[in-house]
Image: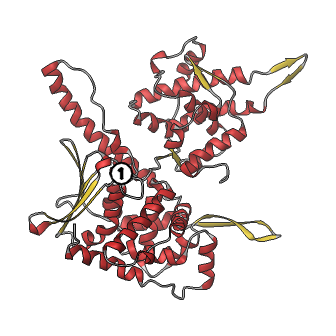
Amino acid sequence: MALSASLRLDLTNILVPLMGTVVNNEGVERSEAITRSGSDQLTELKLATLIGRLRIEDAIKTNFRTLVAASNQMKFSRYLQDLTLEAGAGPTIQQALTSLDPARLSMAIQISFLAFGHDHQSLAQAITQAIQEALVASNNPPERGLDYISVLGVITACQQQTAAFGWAYFYEAVEAKIVHSIKENKDGLRQDERRRTGNTKTPELPWGLLERGLPYVILKSLLIHLISIQDFPEHRLLHLSTECGTSTIVIWCYYILGLNVKVTCGKVDIVFGEEPYHICVEECDSSKASSTLLERVDKGEPLFTFSTSENDPVDPVIPGEYRLEAKGFAKKALAILGLSSEEAEESAHWLAASCLKHFDIECKPSTSGELKVITMETHISCNVIPSTLFLFDMAKLDPNKIQSLLESEHGKGKQVTDRIKWQSYAALIYIFARVSDRQRCEEVPLSLSAFWDFKKDDHGMSRSGESFTGPLPNILLSYDLLARLLLGRRHSTEFL
């Protein structure tokens, strides 16, 4: 399909300034600091020109500035002055926060957000490819585009330097609203169905809606079209067809950019904002994801369409990174699997009691005459209950119920669901029992994808009936498992 004049204008407005970007006199020292942090000054400028002109909502800007501004540096040794451990806002984010150019901050916020929900390498490849295709479509040489390695460096720098910002909260709020709206509708439909047929089977929720990774064509469309939609909201409407990436679209377009969004799943409309809607998302198989830019004033005339193609040089869907805040992590993970809040809290009691039983078996003191030798792991026993409370976001456990479970032979069989890997939850309790200051870790985003990938070979534990067997994760293994939860897809032995 030939490019319309309107789309050519859109591409020109984006790409001409991008191609003219040059490094200005912002100081050699800061430029070198950005390079040392793994980012690239020129690529940051190009990305700021590409997406930095999008206007960020004031509430997001204010909170972002407040939460990520702090920066701490520590020298490893007086003999190694050039080796510094840095936490918080590094040179890339410090420049975004202090620059007179608002595009810097806009770019940093959006890249931080996209990096939170996606695999970094796949995201860098998708952004690089999307810009290259836009250059070709506008008759510009693709050599003027972005370099994959440099884009990856910017993505990594933005994510690492803005870890204090709670993107997990936005995801949880959006996903909770989507699930609640669909459940509420299905409950009503279920009652009608029961009256007509007597069928009591609970319909499955479309869990694909909770997959955070964007399809490539959706990312490409948003990169190209969001500027014109924000500049001319009364003239443009973007229609997106996808199942996965829905929550990412809502956060990016509604919470960050202030555009009104409507999500349609079957016969259910979930709205974010008010009419007129600027972005409409319709559920479809993500292998057939597409986007259509419409002209409102011309009876919804399509201006341009992107469709998923087998010839796309990148994966159809950018792998997502599903993260939840550490406090309440276990309870939220069980909720995604369909357990109610009451069922999750019952499970917390059973898990705590089972871990205490397992601990007593594995770390039972051995006696030799008058000498008792107790393993190094004994000190974590008193932290099993506090760790469980932290992971299930509960104020307290019922001591009578715990005692009853400890004295019982079989515990609560109805709480043990075979489809849930309870031994992974037990390992998680042991890991956080070793964390001395859990309060400071409450908002740390942990990878749910990495947690669901835990298996016996990783932590050494298994479940026999309603009991756990196998050794407790030692301190080194606990460190490795926690690193997986923190790093997600970036975890590797080489990285550590």
Comparing 368 with 473, the one in front is: 473
Seen as rendered, the residue at the extreme top is 409
Which quarter of the image is occupied by the N terminus? bottom left
Q: Is residue 143 above or below residue 481?
A: below
Q: Is residue 390 above or below residue 143?
A: above
List the residue tagged with mark 1: 245
- Residue 403 falls left or right of residue 99: right
Count of numbered circles in the view: 1
Who's the residue at 32% across and 78% down the image? 139
Badge 1 amino acid: Gly
Seen as rendered, the residue at the extreme bottom is 25
In the structure shown, which secondary structural element does the residue marked by tag 1 occupy?
A: loop
Rendered location of residue 233, percent (x, y)? 21, 69
Rendered location of residue 228, percent (x, y)? 26, 72
- Quarter location, residue 8: bottom left
Rendered location of residue 206, percent (x, y)? 31, 38
Q: Is residue 55 visible?
A: no
- Residue 248 falls left or right of residue 237: right
Who's the residue at 47% across and 78% down the image? 45
Q: Is residue 320 visible?
A: yes
Comparing 162 with 219, the one in front is: 219
Seen as rendered, the residue at the extreme left is 299
Who's the residue at 61% across and 30% down the image? 456
- Residue 148 falls left or right of residue 59: right
